[in-house]
Amino acid sequence: MSLTEATTKRDALSTVNGSDCDAAAAAKRRKNDETTTTTTNVRALARRRCDVEVRLTQNSTAEKNRIREHVLDYFERKGSVEVLASNAIELERNEGNGEEEETMAFLRKNCEKITFYFDDRVEESVEKTPSLMFYEIDFRVHVHEINEDGAGEEREDDDEIATYKEYALPCREFSEYWDSLYFDDDTKSRLKNYAQTALEFGNLNVNASLVAFNRVVLLHGPPGTGKTTMCKGLAQKLAIQMLDTYSEPVLVEINAHSLFSKWFSESGKLVGKLFEKIQELTEDEDTFVFVLVDEVESLAAARKATGSEPSDAIRVVNALLTQLDALKEKKNAMVLTTSNVTEAIDVAFIDRADVKVYVGNPGHKARREIMMSWLTELARVGIIDRCPENYVGVDPSGKLEKATEGLSGRALRKLPFLTFAGINRNIGDGPMKLEDFLEAVYEKATSEKREREKLVLPKK
C-alpha cells in the first residue's frame, strides 16, 4: 500500500471514529439532559403545597404583585420552613439587617397578618417538626383586603324577620373562624380538599351528568361543635384562595324559619323566590356564591304522606330539592348545610349531599388546643399572669383534661369567662396566678358537667 493510500485510509478511519465519538458524546448529553429534566419534574411534582394568606392593612396602597414578591423573598431568605398545619410570620420581630429588614419593614407597613398553611394530608412527625427548603415548597400567595362591612339583610315584603343575610367575602367577622377550630382527626383537611376538588371540577366544566357532583355539603352532629363556624370559615378560606378567579365572592346565610309562611301553600313559593335571587347573583361571572342553610332539617324534613293534598312542609322540601338541582348547573355556587338531627332530614336531600361529615365534641387533643388558645389570649390581655409554652405545663396530672371530657367546643370556649365570672375578683385586681385560675377552671368544669347531667337525666 502506498503512503498516499495509507494516509487516506487513516483519515477515513479517523473521521468515522470522530463521528462515533461525537455521536456518543451527544447521546450522553441527551441522556444527562433527560435525567436532569426527569429529576426536575419529579422535584416539581414532589413539592409540598403551602397556601400563604396575606391580609392587607386598610391603608395599604402597594400592588398585590409587589406584596407577593416580598413574601416570597422573605421565605427564600429564610431558607427552610417548618412544616406545620398553620403558622404565621411575626411581623413585629426584626429579621436580620439590610435587605432582610427592608423586606420586613415593607411587610409590616402593608400587611395586617400573614398566615401560611401546609397541605396536612401527609402525616407529620410527632417527635420533631420536619422542615423543607424553599425550593421544595409550592408557595401559593393569596393577597386580600378584608371587608369591614357587616351583613346586608333581605326581607320579604313587610316581614320583620330577614329571609337571608348576605356577606361580602372575605369579611372581618369570619376572619378567625377557621383557625379557631380544632379536631383530633383530619376533618378540616377532608372538607377543604372536597371543596377544592368540587371547584376544580366545575372550572374544568366536567359534565356532572357523567361524573356526578352537586357541590352540596352536610355537616351533622350535636349542638355546639362548630358546624356553622366551620361552614363560614370554609367559605372565607375558599374565597381568599379564589380571588384571582372570582373577585366578588359572597355568602348567603338563609334563615330557614323565616321561609314558613302563615298562609297555606305559600312557603314553597318563598323558597322558590329566594333561590331565584341566588340564581341572579350567580349570573355575574366574577361572583362565587356560598349558600349556608343552618339547621337544614327545618327545610328538608322527611316527607310523609298525609292524605291526598301535600302539606306545606312537603311543598317546601320539594321546592328546595328542585332549586338545588337547578343550582348545581352553576359552577360558581356551593351549598353548605348543617344539622343537629339528621334522622329528621329527607333521604332525597341526604342523597344530594356529596359529603356528609360528622362533627362531634372535641377529643383530648382538640380540648388541649382549645384550652391553650384561650390561656394564651388571657395572658396577652393581662387577666392571668402567664401561659406555659405547652399543655404539659398547664395540666401535668391530666385532671383538667378529664374534667372537660364530653363538653362541646362551645361550652369549652365559654369556660374561662364563666370561671372568672364566678370568682370573687375584679379585673382591676391585676393578673391572676395561673395555678389559681386553673384550679378555678377545674371546679367550674366539674360543676358544669353536673348541671348538664341534671338537664339530660329524666326526673325520678
Image (spheres, helix red, strand yellow):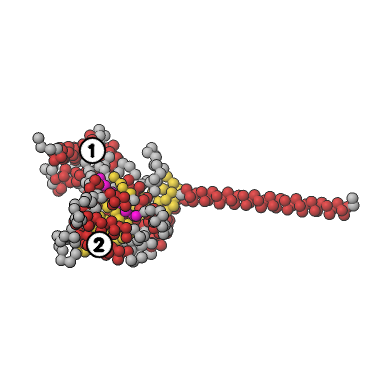
| Left or right: residue 459 compared with residue 210 | left
Spatial CA span between label 1 and label 2: 44 Å
Q: Amino acid at mark 1?
A: Glu
Query: Is any part of residue 253 visible from this angle?
Result: no
In the rendered picture of this protein, how many numbered marks are placed on residues? 2
Q: Which residues are magenta?
A: 214-221
- Where 204 sits versus 387, above or below? below
- Where 270 sits versus 454, above or below? below
In this view, the mark in front (1 or 2): 2
Say which quarter of the image contains residue 358: top left
Quadrant where the image shows the C terminus = top left
Q: Which residue is mark 1?
A: 405
Question: Residue 273 at what x, y percent from top left?
Answer: 24, 64
| Element under disc 2 | helix
| Element under disc 1 | loop
Near-viewer residue (195 or 426): 195
Q: Main secondary structure of the magenta part?
A: strand
Question: Residue 67 at what x, y percent from top left?
Answer: 39, 60
| Residue 33 colored in magenta in the image | no
Q: What residue lies at 89% left-to-right and 50% top-to-bottom?
A: 1
Question: Residue 357 at what x, y percent from top left?
Answer: 30, 46
Query: Are there few (<14), some (14-19), or many (20+) residues within 10 Å of tag 1?
Result: some
Q: What residue lies at 54% left-to-right and 48% top-to-bottom?
A: 39
Query: Are there few (<14), some (14-19), or many (20+) residues within 10 Å of tag 2?
Result: some
Near-viewer residue (92 or 275): 275
User: In the image, which disc is placed on residue 272?
Assistant: 2
Question: Residue 11 at what x, y percent from top left?
Answer: 80, 53
